[in-house]
Image (spheres, helix red, strand yellow):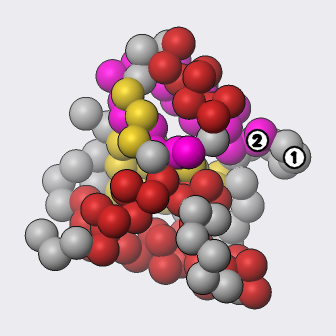
């Protein structure tokens, strides 16, 4: 099963000051996901973010939505689910949840996923 992570939704799920350093918050999430993933295939989908995070390291791939604007990352996640309906999407965005479930994907909420990242293996 491939995990598809709505990065800004996960980052924004906790009011920890992430808005003061969006790039730093993005880097922290990618680092946490990389430490957690093991052999699980994971794709982290960004709305925006630094170029040096893009690509694949181990089983974690970081991509940026190909367009800017409202729902850009959501649309990219839906496109990825269309090619892999068995994916598990991490988001708490109600509209995105509805869209990906209609395509057959499972969903895990952002808060639950953050707790997963912070739990010892």
Which image quadrant is residue 88 in?
top left
Whether residue 56 appears in this view of the structure is: no
Which quarter of the picture shows residue 98?
Answer: top right
Residue 39: image location, x then y, percent: 17, 53
Q: Can residue 77 be seen in this view?
A: yes
Q: Give the residue drawn at x 42%, y 34%.
A: 107
Position of residue 114 measured from the top left corner of the image (x, y, whole percent): 40, 64
Residue closest to the eye, 52 or 40 = 40
Q: Dot 1 lies on which element?
A: loop
Instruction: Tell whether label 2 touches label 1 (CB within 8 Å).
Output: yes
Q: Please tell me whether residue 24 is drawn above or below residue 97 in the rendered image.
A: below
- Please identify the residue farthest to the right as the structure is shown: 69
Check disc 2: other Cα within 10 Å, few if <14, some if 14-19, many if 20+.
some
**Residue where numbered disc 1 is placed:** 69
Q: Which dot marks residue 72? A: 2
| Residue 78 shown in magenta | yes
Residue 23: quarter of image:
bottom right
Q: Is residue 79 above or below residue 119?
A: above
Using the numbered discs, state the Cα–Cα distance from disc 1 to disc 2 in whole angstroms: 6 Å
Which residue appears at 25% of the width and 66% of the height?
36
Does the stretch in magenta take in 77? yes
Pick the residue in front: 97 or 33.
97
Residue 94 horizontal/vertical position (percent): 63, 34
Q: What stretch is highlighted in magenta?
A: 71-92
Q: Nearer the viewer, residue 15 or 80?
A: 15
Q: In this view, does 38 lie to the left or right of 113?
A: left
Above or below, 66 against 49 in this view is above
Residue extending farthest to the left is 121
Q: In which quarter of the image is the C terminus?
A: bottom left
């Amino acid at each position: 099963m491939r995990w598809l992570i709505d990065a800004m939704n996960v980052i924004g799920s906790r009011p920890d000051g992430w808005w003061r350093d969006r790039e730093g918050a993005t880097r922290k999430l990618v680092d946490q996901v990389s430490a957690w993933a093991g052999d699980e295939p994971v794709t982290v989908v960004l709305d925006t973010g630094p170029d040096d995070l893009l690509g694949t390291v181990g089983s974690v791939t970081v991509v940026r939505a190909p367009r800017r604007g409202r729902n850009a990352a959501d649309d990219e996640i839906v496109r990825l689910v269309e090619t892999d309906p068995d994916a598990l999407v991490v988001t708490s965005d109600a509209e995105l949840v509805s869209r990906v479930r209609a395509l057959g994907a499972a969903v895990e909420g952002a808060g639950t996923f953050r707790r997963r990242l912070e739990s010892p293996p």
